[in-house]
Image (spheres, rainbow, N blue to C red):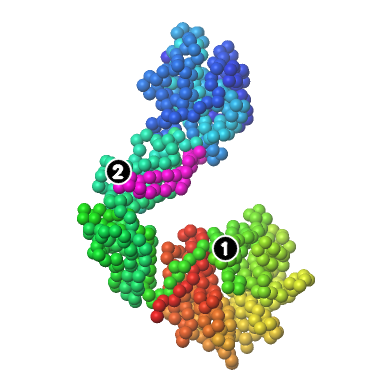
């Protein structure tokens, strides 16, 4: 009697041997059934998934880890003993969690045969459940231990994501199956999703998650650390369903008055990656959280929180927790204060500028047990504008552009290869695709501008596949899309156009300017395209002939005002800012330089607006690293006023808007967006949006009804958002 190992590898091609009730031939030796001894018949079909789980941590099953077996198969320790000579002796092993990304490639078995006589026909046969033919596919583990099954891998996967291996004995002897090994491609099981945790009683947490197709069970892990370090496996045997009640009966006091963190892993032959982490406050006494937790007052250095409480005063009072990060972990180092039982507020003194403070509160009993935790609230000191009124617009990429539509707003943004426009209606946002793109044919990226007037939206952008310039106009559900420059040629060295584009509309005419980076010979050009909404085609003209190599024109601004079309831009090679108009003949020469301070390089981060009876623009000086506000003056140059500190590298991505006697601007630097408001001077402060730590490198400021609206991307979540600015109380 010898111990043998079988490996069946699923390869390409097809050679099916035998059926559910009999055997056929397909060669011999390593790839078929030896003539003369047929595999047994009568193996159950379809197979049934196992409720038993492998105790191993890999793909190895013990012989006793079968899903189904005959009465003539018995456990022999961790092995399985098959006894022939009577009814068919067989066993079936199951593997859950198979998918198109995780196919069953091969299986192996370690076994031994014990014939009664040398030639009595005792032989172990192995089968794979082949769902391509809805039958068992038989193999003979004799000769070479590397018997190969010639079939497509996906034929060994059931519609429910299961794989099955069967062993059956022919002849009067016995066989002992010691181990069965499954081999798959890719990751084994997907991680469970949408894990939630809720403390419903003292020392009881209820967990729930989504089912994982093909999982044979789940393991739950608990930790007191946010990073799930030092986890405890809560269950002994895999959990059959997708919910679990965690009782802390072994640790009656340890898991109280603290946050506890959970993860779940799906179990097959091996565990999946962990689920999301669920965080839950485990209270020591089942008392409600204080009600109406709120910011009650603020001064230049103090924030006072307040709450309501129904019923008798808690014996020790109220515990207030404070941190400077949202959704914070509570431990021994967390700032916290005990407030007397009869009080309903707490003032946090010595608050620092530029810092958001986050608060939570609960009751505390005479035995130091804490109740349910309140919702988290946040605030900064009162000399800052409040930007906590936040709406989510959509999920998208930057750059983004925004426009006022009456008292509402519209935002254009990149969504994969496309550009979408989302429009608000009483705070509700709806989006459609203005320039639909495709990874295979058209990819809009990098450059985009957006405008609205008189019921017409206008959008321009750059198709990087062909290097073409495009425009879309009309409105949601009614877009007209035109290639305004280029021919769709996607050759590598085809001339590129559509860079650094800007557009404007007055509701009657459309205007687009874009950079045409000509192929040699020829210097690059700025092209102006105009079209009447009443009809006709696009008209094209060379707006400005650039010098050879003068392609660095990072920002332009095109704007209709009082019946004229105005343009703001830079020279490209020289530190000169140009301002001109169509009625003025589009003049570009040294007499139109609006900023001529020596030693300055005002080349980027421009915006243009009419305010207080004259033009204003922003411009960033790369030498001093300051953002300047320029206002129109005659004779030239325009007046300059620095609105950021010297050398602090702030002033990037500047945008501005004005309404009546109010003008505001935003700009980026040092990891934050800043907000500037004109009164007698341009005074600025950091924009603090609760819960947002990482802004995208493109944002907008728009004024509506005298209120500023900050439109930005939350780079942590990928969401585009709009926050309304509320001034501090006087």
Question: What residue did someone put label 1 on?
Answer: 429
Q: Are marks 2 and 1 in contact (CB under 8 Å)?
A: no
Q: Which residues are magenta?
A: 186-213
Residue 34 placed where, x, y %?
57, 16
Quadrant of the image containing the C terminus? bottom left
- Please report whichever mark, 2 or 1, sits nearer to the chain's N-terminal start: 2
Q: Is residue 359 left or right of residue 240?
A: left
Residue 584 placed where, x, y %?
69, 86
Q: Residue furthest front?
A: 311
Q: Is residue 274 left or right of residue 468?
A: left
Q: What residue sits 52% from the left and 32% below the top?
A: 162
Question: What residue did someone put label 2 on?
Answer: 248
Q: Is residue 124 left or right of residue 552?
A: left
Q: What residue sits 48% from the left and 61% below the top?
A: 715
Snapshot quadrant of residue 3: top left
Count of all numbered marks drawn on residues in the image: 2
Label 1 Cα neighbours within 10 Å, binned few <14 / some 14-19 / many ≥20: some
Q: What residue sits 39% from the left and 48% below the top?
A: 197
Q: Main secondary structure of the magenta part?
A: loop
Residue 88 placed where, x, y %?
50, 14
Within the magenta stretch, is there residue 338? no
Compared to residue 193, the image places residue 133 above or below, namely above
Q: What residue sits 42% from the left and 20% below the top?
A: 80
Q: Secondary structure at mark 2?
A: loop
**Frontmost residue, 618 versus 351:** 351
């Amino acid at each position: 009697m010898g111990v043998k190992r079988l490996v069946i590898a699923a390869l390409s091609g097809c050679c099916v041997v035998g059926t559910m009730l009999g055997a056929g031939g397909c060669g011999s030796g390593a790839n078929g059934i030896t003539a003369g001894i047929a595999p047994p018949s009568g193996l159950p079909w379809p197979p049934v998934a196992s409720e038993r789980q492998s105790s191993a941590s890999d793909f190895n099953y013990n012989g006793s880890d079968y899903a189904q077996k005959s009465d003539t198969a018995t456990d022999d320790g961790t092995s399985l003993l098959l006894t022939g000579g009577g009814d068919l002796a067989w066993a079936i092993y199951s593997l859950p969690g198979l998918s198109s990304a995780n196919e069953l490639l091969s299986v192996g078995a370690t076994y031994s045969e014990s014939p009664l006589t040398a030639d009595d026909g005792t032989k172990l046969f192995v089968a794979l459940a082949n769902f391509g033919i809805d039958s068992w596919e038989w193999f003979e583990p004799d000769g070479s231990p590397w018997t190969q099954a010639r079939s497509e891998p996906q034929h060994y996967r059931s519609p429910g994501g299961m794989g099955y291996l069967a062993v059956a004995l022919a002849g009067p002897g016995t066989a002992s199956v010691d181990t069965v090994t499954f081999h798959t491609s890719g990751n084994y099981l997907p991680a469970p999703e949408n894990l939630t945790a809720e403390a419903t009683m003292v020392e009881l947490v209820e967990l729930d998650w989504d089912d994982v197709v093909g999982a044979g069970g789940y393991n739950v892990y608990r930790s007191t650390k946010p990073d799930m370090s030092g986890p405890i496996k809560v269950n002994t045997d895999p959990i059959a369903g997708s919910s679990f009640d965690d009782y802390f009966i072994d640790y009656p006091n340890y898991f109280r008055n603290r946050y506890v963190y959970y993860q779940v892993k799906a179990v097959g032959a091996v565990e999946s990656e962990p689920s999301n982490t669920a965080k839950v406050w485990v209270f020591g006494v089942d008392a409600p959280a204080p009600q109406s937790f709120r910011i009650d007052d603020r001064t230049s250095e103090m924030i006072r929180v307040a709450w309501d409480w129904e019923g008798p005063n808690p014996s020790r009072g109220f515990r207030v927790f404070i941190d400077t990060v949202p959704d914070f972990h509570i431990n021994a180092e967390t700032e916290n204060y005990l407030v007397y039982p009869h009080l309903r507020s707490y003032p946090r003194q010595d608050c620092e500028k530029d810092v958001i403070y986050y608060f939570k509160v609960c009751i505390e009993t005479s035995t130091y047990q804490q109740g349910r935790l309140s919702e988290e609230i946040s605030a900064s000191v009162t000399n800052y504008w409040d930007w906590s009124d936040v709406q989510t617009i959509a999920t998208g990429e930057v750059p983004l552009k925004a426009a006022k539509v009456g008292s509402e707003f519209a935002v254009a943004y990149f969504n994969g290869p496309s550009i979408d426009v989302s429009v608000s209606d009483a705070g509700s946002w709806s989006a459609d695709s203005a320039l639909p793109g495709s990874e295979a044919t058209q990819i809009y990226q990098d450059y985009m501008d957006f405008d609205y007037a008189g019921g017409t939206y206008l959008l321009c952008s750059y198709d990087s596949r062909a290097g073409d310039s495009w425009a879309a106009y009309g409105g949601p559900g009614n877009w007209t899309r035109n290639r305004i420059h280029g021919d769709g040629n996607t050759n590598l060295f085809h001339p590129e156009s559509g860079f650094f584009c800007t557009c404007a509309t007055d509701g009657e005419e459309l205007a687009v300017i874009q950079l045409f980076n000509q192929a040699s010979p020829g210097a690059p050009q700025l092209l102006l395209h105009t079209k009447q909404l009443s009809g006709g085609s696009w008209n094209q003209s060379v707006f400005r002939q650039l010098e050879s190599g003068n392609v660095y024109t990072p920002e332009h601004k095109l704007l209709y005002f009082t019946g004229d079309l105005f343009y703001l831009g830079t020279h490209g090679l020289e530190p000169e800012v140009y301002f001109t108009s169509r009625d003025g003949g589009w003049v570009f020469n040294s007499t139109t330089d609006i900023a001529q301070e020596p030693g300055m390089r005002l080349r980027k981060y421009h915006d243009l607006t009419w305010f207080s009876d004259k033009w204003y623009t922003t411009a960033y000086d790369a030498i001093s690293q300051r953002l300047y506000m320029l206002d129109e003056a005659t004779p030239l140059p325009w007046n300059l006023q620095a609105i950021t500190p010297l050398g602090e590298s702030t002033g990037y991505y500047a945008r501005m808007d004005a309404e009546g006697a109010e003008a505001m601007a935003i700009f980026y630097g040092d990891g934050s967006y800043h907000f500037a408001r004109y009164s007698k001077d341009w005074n600025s402060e950091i924009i603090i949006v609760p819960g947002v730590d990482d802004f995208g490198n493109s944002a907008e400021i728009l004024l509506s009804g005298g209120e500023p609206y900050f439109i930005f991307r939350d780079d942590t979540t990928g969401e585009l958002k709009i926050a309304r600015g509320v001034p501090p109380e006087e």
